[in-house]
Amino acid sequence: MTDALSFLWPAFLVSVCLVGIHAYFGIQVLARKVIFVDLALAQIAALGATIAFMLGHPAQSGATYGYSLAFTLLAAVLLAFTRAWSGRVPQEALIGVIYVVAAAAAILLIDRAPQGAEHLKQILTGNILTSGLNEIAIVAPLYAAVGLLHWLLRRRLTGAGSLFFEFVFYASFGVVVTSSVAIAGVLLVFSFLIVPAAIGVMFASSQGRQLAIGWVTGSLTSAAGLAVSFVLDLPTGAAMVCAFGAALVVAGIAYAFRPAGRRQAARVAAATARWGVAAILAGSAVQLAAAPRADQPLLDVAEYAVPSLRQLYFTRIEQATYLDASAYAERYRAEAEQLNDLERRKRTEGEALDDFALARVSSFLKSYGEMHKGEQFVMAEVRARARERVRWGFGAGLLALAVMVVVPWRRLRRSPARVGAAAP
């Protein structure tokens, strides 16, 4: 546990720094309704890094950062002008064009590069797990300076401003994105930007409370994503992005069940569950009637949970044959497992089996495996024939059950006035 904490702690501190600045910019982006501007700027920065990569500069070099920053500042100029065009063309559409063009240009550049696929993966997911105090020493002062600039110009950088202050907003945002993409990648930077800010805006009205909620949820989610990636040995960037997505889902459910909307959310959840169950039952009925020998997930799960359900449509001979094949299949599986345990125990104790013994064990394992498959085939064939015989009756029963799941609820929802009006 101590080793895990010492390994993940630097990456967590970097994540907290990224959440701190991006949650603020996320709130501004949501207020301006330019949700994908971060992706556009991040992709522009990635295009600059790709050009530097094609020219032979290392990924973490100052030259690569310079190329990314230069391209991002050019994009900031273009984005400042798009605010004036938004009267006729939505600004979000123009931002989308910038993103797809930058992404296509980067793909064209790395198409023939020897390590192009690896470079593209690095740009998208980053490598935040290897970041630490050196990165914090660089980005923390930079983010603090950007935050101070926005606090001093808070009245001019919020809402519709002049062309110059629009450029200042997008340029400072671009500086932050350029630094963040080099550490965390395009996808994780977008998650840092939108998810904490969206959760903060969802549960609070004032910017201070929105920031506080965004910082807390972003930090906790970052810690959870890092822990999951470490425990399950998953790619860190992708795991953290999925963790942020899960956090937004949980926040959305919690918001729906807040005291003001709890009753409505419960009704929607109940209706969704009813129609979902009805759809599964109806789909299983149609599948059973049309293809009784195909896999039937609903029936398979039900029979696995309650094996006695097979007695509803198995004949006595089919039941006896199925149980006999099941017993033999379990016997062969157990025999094979015992041989595997014997080999493992001998290897652990330092008494390695000779070539003859290994060949003999392999032969027995192969035989047991083939016999196990044979018994499973018998079980599947007996079950398929029984289902084929009763498909119309069982299919009709499942369809009737699907109707019963939905129809009584509709009748209960009818008002007494309508019921009285409908009576003769």
Image: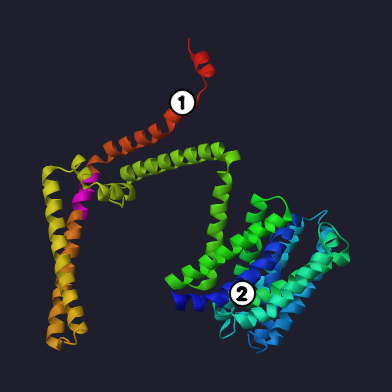
Q: Which residue is mark 1?
A: 412
Residue depicted at 16% across the width and 77% down the height: 342
**Residue 121 placement: quadrant:** bottom right
Q: Secondary structure at mark 1?
A: helix
**Residue 340 placement: quadrant:** bottom left
Residue 385 included in the magenta stretch of the image:
yes
Please state which amino acid type lies under the numbered disc 2. Val
Numbered tag placed on residue 14 in the rendering: 2
- Report the side of 354 relative to 191 (left or right): left
Height in image: 275 above or below 57? Answer: above
**Residue 171 placement: quadrant:** bottom right
Quadrant location of the N terminus? Answer: bottom left
Height in image: 409 above or below 103? Answer: above
Which mark lies nearer to you, 1 or 2?
2
Residue depicted at 55% across the width and 80% down the height: 130
Q: First in sequence, mark 1 or 2: give its number.
A: 2
Residue 211 percent location from the top left of the image = 68, 59
- Report the side of 312 relative to 206 (left or right): left
Residue depicted at 49% across the width and 27% down the height: 413
